[in-house]
Amino acid sequence: MWWLIDTDKDEEGMRVLADLHGGDIDDPVAKAEFREIKEKVIFEREHGDGRSYAVMWRRYKRRVLLAMSSQAFAQLNGING
């Protein structure tokens, strides 16, 4: 749902949040959570480092390497089904 709101698909994001909170689109908890996510998205757009693979690599290099190596070893072992 974060991605939906981040890509300005607010109605779809709100629908997903409503489904998570019982399906009522007027649920106050779902609306509050939507506002919180929307505010965070706007804040990140205004004050963030930007979004690119270079930024991700600098910030999360260790995590990316761990994820890539885990996936590579899983493929080599044949444990993915």
Image (cartoon, helix red, strand yellow):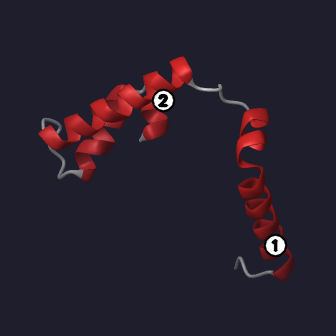
Name which quarter of the figure residue 72 lies in. Answer: bottom right
In-front residue for pair 24/54: 54
Label 2 CA crowd tier, 10 Å (few <14, some 14–19, many 20+): some
Mark number displayed over residue 75 = 1
In-front residue for pair 29/15: 29
Mark number displayed over residue 24 = none
Quadrant in which the C terminus is drawn: bottom right
The residue carrying mark 2 is 6
Q: Is residue 78 above or below residue 48?
A: below
Q: Is residue 22 above or below residue 3?
A: below
Of labels 2 and 1, earlier in sequence is 2
Quadrant in which the N terminus is drawn: top left
Residue 8 visible (yes or no): no
Circle 1: residue type: Gln
Count of number-bearing discs: 2
Instruction: Name the residue located 45 percent from the left edge and 34 percent from the top edge.
Output: 4
Label 1 CA crowd tier, 10 Å (few <14, some 14–19, many 20+): few
Instruction: Name the residue located 78 percent from the left edge and 75 percent from the top edge.
Output: 74
Name which quarter of the figure residue 18 lies in. Answer: top left
Q: Nearer the viewer, mark 2 or mark 1?
A: 2
Circle 2: residue type: Asp
Image x and y of residue 43, in percent = 46, 24
Residue 67 visible (yes or no): yes
| Residue 20 horizontal side relative to residue 77, left or right | left
